[in-house]
Image (cartoon, rainbow, N blue to C red):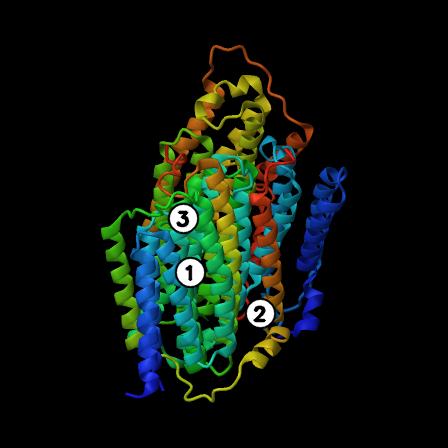
Amino acid sequence: MIELKYFLLVSACLFSLGVFGVLTRRNAVNVLMGVELILNSANLNLVAFSRYSSVGIDGQMFAVFVIVVAAAEVAVALAIVLTLYRVLNTVNLDRADVLKR
Amino acid sequence: MNLGNLDSLNFFYPELILLGGMLLVVISDISLKGLRVRINPLLTLAALLLALFYTLQTDHGSAMTLFEGMLALDNFALYFKVFLLVAGILVLLGSLHSEELAAVHQGEFHALLLAVTLGMLLMANSAHLVMLYLSLELVSLTSYIMVGYLRSDRLSNEASMKYILFGAVSTGAMLYGFSLLYGMTGSLDLFAIRDALLAQEVVGFNQVTLMLVVVLTTAGFGFKTAAVPFHFWCPDVYTGAPTPVTAFLSVAPKAAGFAILVRFFLGGLSQPAGGQWGFISGIDWPLVLIAVSVMTMTLGNIAALTQNNLKRMLAYSSIAHAGYILMGAALLTGTGLKAMLVYLFVYLFMNLGAFFVVTVIFNSEKTFELQDYNGMFRRSPFLAVAMSIFLLSLIGIPPFAGFLGKLYIFGAVIDQGLYWFALVGALNAAVAAFYYMRVMKHMILENDDRPPTPLRISALNVALLVLLLVPNILLIVFWSPIDRWTANSITLFGGL
Amino acid sequence: MSVTDIVFILTAVVTVGSAVVVVVSRSLIYSVFSLLFTFFGVAILYVFLGADFLAGAQVLIYVGGILVLLLFGVMLTHRLYNLNLTTERFQPIAGTLIAAAVFASISLAAFKTKWKLVGEKELEPTTQQIGEAFLSSYLLPFEIASVLLLVALIGAAMLVRRRTDV
C-alpha cells in the first residue's frame, strides 16, 4: 500500500505548479488552467485524507462538490472571457487595462 | 440541539422564500413579456421583506445546528441574516432608478440579487466546511456575474474578468487549506474540528501546518472582505461594476465575509476561555489579524488620498473600513466582536448612502470625476447636504452614526490595553478625514462659471436617501437598542 | 518494489509532468491537451485511493466538460486562421520564487505533519455510500449546489447573449 505522504507530494506539486501558472501567465484561459490545477490538487488531498485520516467518506463528498463548483465557475469564466473578447478583441490580461489608467 | 433534515425546515423559511422568489422572478421574466418590468422588482422586494419578517420571527430558543450539522443557527447568525436582508432591500430600492442598470434588461438582475442574498444568509450560518465553501462560491459566482452585468461596457467586463480570476485563485487556496485541516482532524464539521484539535494538543510541526492552514484560508476570507494583501481586485472591480452593484459589494458580501471569518476562526480554531477566545496552538494568531487590520486601513486610506474618481475613492475607503472592522475581530473578545457588529451596522447606512448619492448624480451627469461635482450645492442642496452627512459619518465625526461605530471599536481596543493599536486607528481616521473633506469641498465650496442648473432627482431616490439619512442622524440618540441587540448577538454556537 | 508502486510512480510522473507542460508551454493548445493528461492522471490516483465514483466523475466532468469548455474558449477567442496561439509570460522570476516557496512549505508540511490516521480501511465501492450521503447528511449542500448551477446557467446565458432587448 502506498503511503499517504506520496499522494500529498503529488498534490503539493500540482498546487505549486498551479500557483506558478496563475502568477506567470497573462492569458485568461491559461490562468484558468492554473486554477484547475489548484482545485485538482486540493481534491487529491481531500480524497487521500478521506482514505487515510477519516472514518467516513466526507472528503470524497467534498471533492464531488468541488468538481461541481469548478464546472460552474469555468462556464461563467468563459462566458466573461467571450464577452470581453467581443468588446476588446483580446483575452490578455495586461491589455485589459482601461481600469489602470 | 441538532436537527435533522425535515425538522430543520421550520427554521429555514427565509432561505426558502428567497429561493422561491428567485424562481418566480426567472419564470415571470420569460413568460410575462410586458408586465415583467413592473412585476419583477415587486416580487423581489416582497421576497426580501417576507424573508426579513420570518427572520425577525425566528425564535430558536437556544443555539442549534440544522440539516445534520450543516448550519448553525445562533444569535450571531440571526444578526447577520437581518443585516444582509436589510442591505439587500436597500440595494434593490437603490437599483430601481439607476440609469446604468436601466440600459440593460433587468430580469436577471433581480434573480441574481435574490440568489446572492440566499448565498450570504447561508454563509453567515455555515458550520461545516462543505457548506462554507459552497455558500462562499454561490456568493462569489453571483457577484462575478453582477459585476459584468453591463455586458457591452468594457470597464464592467474587465472588472468581472479580474474579479473571477482573483476569486477563483483565492478560493482555491482556501480549499487547499481546508483539505490540510481535514487531514489533521479527520472531520469537516467546524465543531468536530475544534474538538479534534483540542484533543490532540497541537504540538511540533503540526503548529506550523496549522499556521499554513490559517494563511491559506485567510486568502479566501481576505478576498471576500477585501483585506490587504488580498485587496488588489477591489478598486478595479468597484470602479467597473454598475454603481448599485458596487454599493452592494462594498457592504453585504463584505459583512458575510466577516461573519464567516469569525465563525471559522473563533468557532473552529479557538476555544472560549473566560470571556475571551484563546487560539488553540501556541502561535500568536491575534497578532497576525492585528497586522492585517493595520495594513488594510493604512493602505486603503493612503491610496484613497490621491483618487480623483469618486467611485474609486470610495472603493479604497471601503478597504480602509474593512481594516477598522477587522480591529474588532482581531481582539478575540466579546466586546471586540460586539464593536465589530455595531460598526458593521452603521457602516451599512453610511456607505450605502454615499454610493447612492454617486448613483443619483451619475444618473444625470454621467460622471464619477470629482471636479464634475463642483457647484453641486447650488444645483441640489439636498444632495450636497446628504452626501456631506454620509461623509462626515464615514469620518466618524459626532453627532453622526459613524462616530458611534468608531467609539465602540476604539473603546474595545483600549479595553484590551492595546493603546498603540487604537492610536494607529485614530491616525488613520484623521488621514481619512482629508479625502472625505475634499469631496465636500468640491461639492460645496468650489463653483464653476456655468450657471447652476437644478439637478433632477426622482421621488423614489429622495425617499431612499432620506431613509438612509435617518439612521445616520438618529442612531447616536437611540443607540441603546443597537447596543442591546449586538450584545445579544455575540453568542456563537459552541462559543461564549 | 511491487507492480502497484511502479504504476503509481508512472502515474505521478505523468500527472506532474503534464502539469509542468500546462504552465510552461507557450502554445495554448499544447497547454489544454497536456491538461488532459493531468486530469486523467488524477483520476487514476483516485482509483489508487479507492474512490471509484470520483474517478468516473473526474473523467466525465473534468475531461468531458471542463476541458472541452476550455478548448472552446481557446478556439473562440482566437480567429481560427490565426495559428499563432502563443502566450507571453510576465513576472517569471517572482512567480518562480513564490511557487518554489509554496512548494517547499506545503511539501515539508506533507512529510513532517503528524496527520490523523485511522488505519487500514477496506476497499469497497463508494457509489452507494455517496448516493446515500447526498440524500441524508449532505442533502442541503446537494440542493445548494443545484442553486449554484442554476445561477451559473442564468448568468452565463445572460452574459453571452447578443444585445437584442436594449
Pinpoint the chain carrying mark 3. A
Amino acid type for the residue under numbered disc 3: Ala
Residue B330 appearing in the image: no
Q: Which residue is mark 3?
A: A28
Task: Point out residue B97 in the picture as x, y percentages from the top left corner.
Answer: 64, 32
Amino acid type for the residue under numbered disc 2: Met
Task: Point out residue B386 in the picture as x, y percentages from the top left corner.
Answer: 56, 29
Task: Point out residue C110 in the picture as x, y percentages from the top left corner.
Answer: 31, 74
Q: CA distance from mark 1 to mark 3?
A: 13 Å
Q: Nearer the viewer, residue B297 or B372?
A: B372
Pinpoint the chain carrying mark 1. A
Q: CA distance from mark 1 to mark 2?
A: 26 Å
Residue B12 appearing in the image: yes
| Left or right position of B255 against B317 | right
Task: Give the SS element for disc 2.
Answer: loop
Amino acid type for the residue under numbered disc 1: Glu
Q: Which residue is mark 1?
A: A36
| Left or right position of B55 against A97 | right
Q: Nearer the viewer, residue C28 or A71?
A: C28
In the rendered structure, find residue B70 and report the number of the disc placed on it.
2
